[in-house]
Image (cartoon, coloured by chain):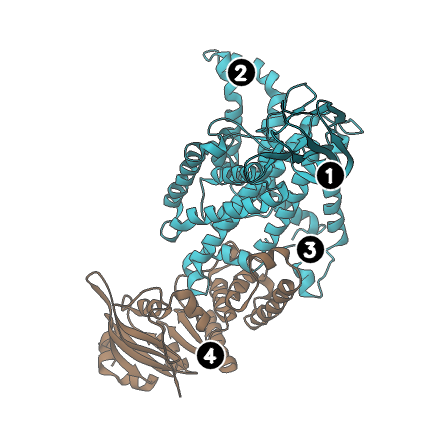
Chain colours: A brown, B cyan
Amino acid sequence: MPVKLHVDNVSLSFGGIKALQDVDFQVEAGEIYAVIGPNGAGKTSLINSINGFYAPQQGRIIFDGRDMTHIPPYKRAELGISRTFQNIALYTNATVLDNLMAARHIHMKSNMLTGALFWGPAQREEIAHRRLVEEIIDFLELEHIRKSIVGTLSYGLRKRVELGRALALEPSLLLLDEPMAGMNVEEKEDMARYILDIHELQGTTIMLIEHDIGLVMDISHHIAVIDFGLKIGEGSPDEISRNEAVIAAYLGEGER
Amino acid sequence: MANIHPAGVFDTTYEEDMSVDRTPRDKLWKNLAFVALLLVPLLSVSGPLGLISDQYVGLIARIAIFVIAAQGLNILVGYTGQISLGHAAFMAIGAYSSAILARELGFTFWTALPVSAVLTGLIGLFFGLPSLRVKGFYLAMATLAAQFIIPWVLRYPLEGITGGTRPLNVPAPLIGPFASYADDPIDDATPLVFQAGDPYLVDVISLELGRVDGAQPAIELRNPSGDIVPPGDFNMTVFRDADGELTGFSYIATKPGEYAVTATAEAGATAFRARVRRGKALSFATETAMYYIIVPLSVFLMFLARNIARTRTGRAFISVRDNDLAAELLGINVFGYKLRAFFLSAVYAGIAGCLLAYERNSLSLDMFRLDISIEMLAMLIIGGAGYPLGALFGVTFIRVLQEAAIPALRPWLLEILPVLFPFIEVVNITSAINPILFGGALIVFLVLEPRGIAHRWEVLKVAWKIRPYAY
């Protein structure tokens, strides 16, 4: 399998706090890769570095064989990286439809002038992209709230809308930052099903951060464990469940 | 808010779902409203029907101008979530640049309008640069700089062309001259006398000086008041040859009455030939005529803004407003779109400023003070920032309050207020009525309907459309 994403010896610190220290791992194309670790371990900092929101002091982010370390965030999205956020970051005062359409931005061509006239190519483009967005709406079962303002929706629905927005970008690498945080068992199962479907139907490479160990063990192909900014273990779910360091730091000594 | 279609109307295509006016009835109402708006000047006292006061024609024209400006602010503040306290200064750039282009460089209104709009846009872009680093309150302070720098630059460094603190005359927009109806040779000492100056179909008088032997003849143009029109008059364009000698002039006769052109040979000079050509041009000097430029343009710009808001650029603006971090990580160049919003907003302000200049025929820096910038923000809050019709509602509400409701209430207020506040002098009360009611309206809206009249309107519209069902 070719390497989709290579996090090459990345170190990131904020003043004296070392968020990431020499973190190094590779995500293969077409796999589900999970990153686990206790709160404050540096998981979100890692995703933010991949996204370009943080600039690591050391190391490189290599995506599809291309060094992206100095590319601004919005251009990384154009290359095919999309994400969701731990604390939902939707466009709250817009409709679900507009949230998803906004993520089609990089695939659309109309500009201020052609959009202002809303005529010919600009209108056809709107309709073509609307059709694609409607497929995502169907897939995530969001039809009934299509025209609702996002700010009025429940937490679980917002999480789903956010996944939809990330998908609307048609990413080749999808970063999911705690997609199941704060959900009940049914909602978690729904979300896991969506993630597996996305992976299966579109072959999207998925990197996710999640706290629910059982679920992570079930759906991911490879797992990396981070603690205090250090990668303390990596491997298949089986290997991780036997890794001494991981058990000590994360799963707990008593459970052995 | 999404477009809600009437109960019983179902969409079968995405095109139908996206349309603003889904049913023929929606379209009919909108077109009727536009036609009614265009008929207003015909109903006025100076029009053929004479039903309503001329004051309302001017009021609607001024509302339409400020709707353009406020819609520009709406794009920046309502859609993109940035802020500008320098909007009136951008209007000043549009106004002064269009007037100066016409006065100094011979541009017509039709070319000066787009050029000044783009110029204003570029200056707006420049003052949008701080938005890269600062947000909210700090950005407000940074844009306040525009409100101080721009009028200062117009007042002192550019005094030579702007007239500084003195009012600047602005020529009226013209179409033409498209037909010349008279072409008379004139000679020594016999004046050519003629009637000219219909307010709508003005005369453009042009004089061409042919071959001159010896000294130049003295040429005079007298207007209906009997005054000699000086070569510096803003309705006159003077043509000179390479040596700086007069070869002719072109004058727009706006005042109705009798004009006279006289050419007198200097003593000792032998011969000259001169021709006076008179042509007709459509003039927009009157308030009624300007109305037909301002109102359709305002409607058209509202239409453009509405389309921008519902397509790619508008969604990028909304993304930047609602969550700039997510927008950046999902492929939107946040700074680029902030700058686009500043540009677009200033273009709208520039167009509004240009129209204001040509509507008033006279410009002064007092028309673009800081309180106008703040008033426009207040209008937007009252109308509903971030709604396509927010600017229209806000400006209409405030202008009608200021220019129609307050004058109507004034006698009654003047009777009752001195009784309520006997400790304040009557003179002070008179001057305070306007700001008090304006401030009062703003507070009422901020407390009771912070999302503005437009939000209320959308709620009502939805309720009306989905009747007889409750939801």
* Residue A178 relative to residue B283: left or right: left
User: In the picture, residue A40 is in which quadrant?
Assistant: bottom left
Quadrant, the C terminus of chain A: bottom left
Marks 4/3 in contact by CB < 8 Å: the verdict is no
Give the amino acid type for the residue marked by disc 1 in the picture.
Leu
Q: Residue furthest left?
A: A16
Q: Nearer the viewer, mark 3 or mark 1?
A: 1
Q: Position of residue B176 (x, y in %)?
A: 71, 41
Crowding near the residue tagged with mark 4, few <14, some 14–19, many ≥20 C-alpha atoms within 10 Å: many
Q: Residues within 10 Å of mark 1 (few under 14, many from 20)?
A: some
Q: Is disc 3 in contact with disc 1, using a CB cutoff of under 8 Å?
A: no
Q: Earlier in the sequence, mark 1 or mark 2?
A: 1
The residue where tag 3 is placed is: B5
Q: Residue furthest right?
A: B49
Q: Report how far apart the C-alphas of labels 3 and 1 lie in the structure.
A: 28 Å
| Amino acid on which the number 4 mark rests in the picture | Thr
Q: Which residue is mark 4?
A: A204
Measured in 3D between alpha carbons, the distance from the residue under mark 4 to the one under mark 2, in whole angstroms, is 72 Å
Give the numbered dot on residue B38. Answer: 1
- Tag 3 subunit: B
Marks 4 and 3, how far apart in space? 37 Å
Mark 2 sits on what residue? B417
Q: Are marks 4 and 2 on the same chain?
A: no
Left or right, residue B195 beside residue B361 = right
In primary-sequence order, the first of circles 2 and 3 is 3
* Callouts 4 and 3 in the same chain: no
**Could you say where residue B72 lies in the image, as x and y percent from the top left?**
54, 45
Q: Nearer the viewer, residue A37 or A186?
A: A37
Between the C-alphas of marks 2 and 3, the distance is 48 Å
The answer to whether residue B343 is seen in the rendering is yes
